Amino acid sequence: MWQDAFPCRLRSILVIGLSVTTSSFIKLFLNVLPQKLRKRVLFVSMEEASEIIGKDYIPPSMNGKLKLEINKPTFTTNM
């Protein structure tokens, strides 16, 4: 179903800055998944994430340097 919708594959999923309680709950859930998928989910701190990804790809709200240019839609009415 989704095979043709998203043309790239996820190598890993970084879960950043969770509390110990929340991360342990999610790790329990991950035990249900196959080993291949479990190895792709990484629990990291913000510092570790910036080393893995690079600060150039992290938004400023997370202490990165990525410049996001979000175009707000303009609405016109024909009245």
Image (cartoon, rainbow, N blue to C red):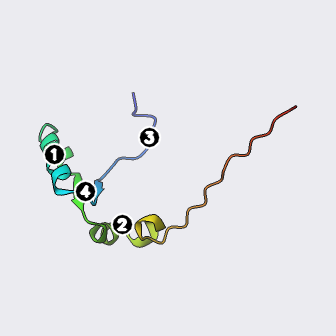
2 or 4: mark nearer the eye: 4
Amino acid type at mark 2: Ile
Residue 72: percent from left, percent from top: 66, 50
Distance, label 2 to label 4, CA atoms, is 18 Å
Secondary structure at badge 1 equals helix
Amino acid type at mark 4: Leu
- Classify 55 as above or below 5: below
Among the two numbered marks 2 and 4 on one chain, the one whose residue lies closer to the N terminus: 4
3 or 4: mark nearer the eye: 4
Secondary structure at badge 3 equals loop
- Classify 1 as above or below 19: above
Q: Mark on residue 18?
A: 4
Among the two numbered marks 2 and 1 on one chain, the one whose residue lies closer to the N terminus: 1
Amino acid type at mark 1: Phe
- Identify the residue shown where x is 16% and y is 43%: 30
Labels in figure, total: 4
Disc 1 target residue = 25
Residue sitting farthest toward the top: 1
Image quarter of residue 17: bottom left
